[in-house]
Amino acid sequence: MTWTAISVALLVLGLGAVIWFQRRYDLDTKLSFDLEHPQLPDPDKPITTSQRKTGKYFLLIMLLFGAQILCGELLAHYYIEDGFFGLPIQNLLPFNVAKSWHLQLAIFWIATAWLGAAAYMVPRLLGREPRRQGRLIDVLFYSLIFVVVGSLIGEWLSMMGKGNKGWWLWGATGWEYLELGKVWQFLFIAAMGLWVFILLRGFLPAMRRAGTPGINTDRTRLTTMLLISAVAIPGFYLASLFILPNSHVTYADYWRWWIVHLWVEGIFECFAVILIGWLMVDLKLATSRSTIRALYFQLILLMGTGVVGIGHHYFWIGDNSIWIPLGACFSALEVVPLCLLVWEAWTHYRAYRENGAQFPYKGTFMFLASMGVWNAVGAGATGFLINAPAINYFEHGTQWTPAHAHAAMAGVYAFFSIAIMLYALRNISRRQAWSEKTEAWIRRSCWALNIGLAGMVFVSLMPLGFIQLADAVANGYWHARMTSFYDSTLAKVLLWGRMTWDLIFTAGVVMLLGVVIHVVRNLKPAQDHEMAESHQQWDKVE
């Protein structure tokens, strides 16, 4: 109770300090154009072979996204009935398989979106197509499919009691977010290593141009930051290899939280923030100098609070009690940079709105603006709520936890991944693929995803979690975690009521899938010999 109160006080103090510091030193991103006479980016430049080949990544993303949503809807049914509308599907896909697939598919499709979008950027930065780059893009793509399909099959076999021999290597490890066996973990790391190699082939030559007359040094720094954050993605995932079959639960869960919190919530966040800055500059919406200053400030806040804030998990693995005050206070301060990003999102949305219908990346900015709001509401507010020690002691792992997880994972990383997917697709497809009808379907999809997610979190999961928290306080944590809790009439009403919001969210996914199929069928032809002159202007002085 004491440290919960102190963390709230530090949150208020931290917000005030950050707002003062940002205003005092003018750390906002500055628009790089006159709103009355904007210099709009040109998405109709020639593309290379490797850029064209990234189109299949985005189709794979939507298929994995759809499969993940179906697993999530199946899980919701398992809370209230043994099956799916009376069908005994639990004999084929039991709860633990559906849950493992739901989590793993989220990581896979979000990672694929980032891999595809970053691979698209390489020729854009370098000004030419690196040798055999298209072949490497194909190798990476089919490697990802092999890892995804192989790991999902291995998890199913392991959890169904088939193929128990070598389960730790090919099956499921049993650790949430790290279910895939060690062989698949190594292959996943190798695939991300290949992705880093693909990026290095374009990023390093672009970075070597720093100091050359006529080259913007700030843009070179932005490229360097993006590369470092990309290298950190496979680098920090290496923590998953420290968990072995005979690892003590405290040791294993310590490294698991590195993946769940530091990798997913920390490194992913840093990569997303830097890539947003890169997009703002590339789309001629922000100056590179102001973007660099804003990114330094935001990254200091993100990592400065997040690295220590991971300690709010350590109480549950039996670590020293010092992590209760440290984890509580720094977890509270994690909300501050997330709220700061809302202002950035609003700035970007305002820039898009002021440009009107002629701006070619409206869909991208709709999802970026949505991401900014969910960053504060989902990752920030609901995360602060469940991590306060006085709440967490009774709530840990109950329905408020998936409320936070859905609001943060879907609202932040999923929407951001959709935004960069639409950005890349707009650049590699023909102009006629982006009619007013296409833009209208993207708008409908964005609204459906936002409404469905908001209803799922705030109309179903949050009220259900409140009832469960009250049960834990009154009768004990063990009582609230019993399956009999879900037999109450109110719990059943809330869980059945979630169906409406799930269907709305699913409709948004289906609409977006239709858009992606339509766009991928209208890709521009590769013109490697023409792209150099069109793309080599990125890092010139503004």
Image (spheres, rainbow, N blue to C red):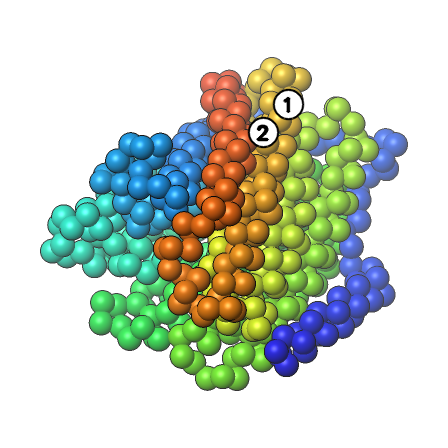
Whether residue 158 appears in this view of the structure is yes
Query: In the image, is residue 291 above or below residue 67?
Result: below
Residue drawn at (71%, 46%) of the image: 345
Q: Secondary structure at mark 2?
A: helix
Residue named by callout 1 = 439
Instruction: Kindly report the distance in space between the C-alpha atoms of the residues bearing marks 2 and 1.
Output: 10 Å
Identity, as a three-letter code, of the amino acid under mark 1: Glu
Whether residue 125 appears in this view of the structure is no
Residue at the outermost right position: 36
38 or 384: which is nearer to us? 384
| Image quadrant where residue 81 sits | top left
Identity, as a three-letter code, of the amino acid under mark 2: Ser
Q: Are marks 2 and 1 in contact (CB under 8 Å)?
A: no
522 or 437: which is nearer to us? 437
Q: Secondary structure at mark 1?
A: helix
Left or right: 514 as drawn, with respect to 194: right
Residue named by callout 2 = 445
Residue drawn at (31%, 32%) of the image: 86
Numbered tag placed on residue 192 in the rendering? none
What x and y, as percent, mark residue 355? 79, 31
507 or 375: which is nearer to us? 507
What x and y, as percent, mark residue 322? 52, 84
Q: Residues within 10 Å of mark 2 (few under 14, many from 20)?
A: many
Of labels 2 and 1, the one closer to you: 2
What x and y, as percent, mark residue 354? 81, 33
What x and y, as percent, mark residue 190? 33, 52
Residue drawn at (52%, 79%) of the image: 323
Q: Residues within 10 Å of mark 1 (few under 14, many from 20)?
A: some
Query: In the image, is residue 201 above or below residue 261?
Result: above
Instruction: Pick whichever of labels 2 and 1 is earlier in the sequence.
Output: 1
If the image is split into quadrants, where does the N terminus sit? bottom right
